[in-house]
Image (cartoon, helix red, strand yellow):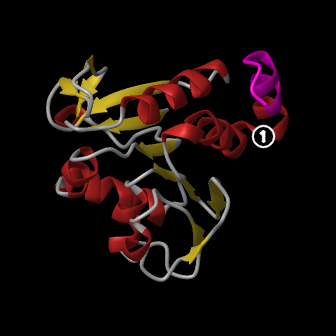
Amino acid sequence: MVYVFLADGFEIIEALAPVDVITRAGIDVKTLGVTGKTVTSSCGVQVNCDTEISEFDFYNVEAVVLPGGMPGTLNLENNETVQRVIDNAMNINIPVCAICAAPSILGHKGLLSGKKAICYPGFEDALEGAEISEDFVVCDGNIITAKGAGVCIDFGLEIVKKLKGEETANKIKEQIQCR
């Protein structure tokens, strides 16, 4: 199961486009409301999550996805359960995937030290110890980072590639007519 953590102020396309792509790969995905069952995106669209963070069980987690957006990123970072989930995922080598401003959460935790990473322009200083990449999506070990909303499909495809392999990712890319 891939869990996409949503907090008020999240960037809608950075959350839901990867949900679509990952689902197409036959991977179970659940949206997890950090600030309630109904979460409001940065543009005001409300999303009803599959479950709330209070009901989260680390059993069968395949990957954790952290969308960006403001103040969504700050709301994720300030949540103790989100912090514990990131720590647990890193300890057992489960992919942690963050896009836009959300890689700053990983940087503040020191998890990007010595790794290649990318984020939304202006957040680079928060990627403490990272080698800032020029790529739009970067996978280094079990951490996947992406630059922003414009590459959310590529971000989702990289998650699929990590979990199901390049052949599956390429098949989906062809199906959705992604360049």
- Say whether residue 119 is visible: yes
**Viewer-side residue, 37 vs 39:** 39
- Say whether residue 87 is visible: no
Percent position of residue 177, x then y = 77, 19
- The stretch of residues the image draws in magenta is 170-179
Work out which quarter of the rendered image holds the C terminus and state it: top right
**Viewer-side residue, 15 vs 64:** 15
Q: Residue at x 17, y 57 (%)?
A: 78
Q: Which residue is mark 1?
A: 165
Compared to 130, does 34 lie above or below? above
Percent position of residue 122, x then y = 40, 65
> Which quadrant of the structure image shows residue 36?
top left
Percent position of residue 124, x then y = 44, 71
Compared to 4, does 134 lie above or below? below
- Local crowd size for mark 1, using a 10 Å CA cut-off: few (<14), some (14–19), many (≥20): few
Q: Is residue 174 magenta?
A: yes
**Viewer-side residue, 24 vs 120:** 120
> Which quadrant of the structure image shows residue 101?
bottom left
The amino acid type, in three-letter code, at marker 1 is: Gly
Q: Is residue 29 magenta?
A: no
Q: Is residue 71 left or right of residue 13?
A: left
- Principal SS element in the magenta part? helix
Total numbered badges shown on the rendered structure: 1
Q: Single out the residue that lies furthest toward the right.
A: 167
Q: Residue at x 42, y 79 (%)?
A: 128
Q: Is residue 111 left or right of residue 175?
A: left
> Which quadrant of the structure image shows residue 133?
bottom right
Percent position of residue 117, x then y = 56, 66
Q: Secondary structure at mark 1?
A: loop
Q: Residue at x 52, y 27 (%)?
A: 17
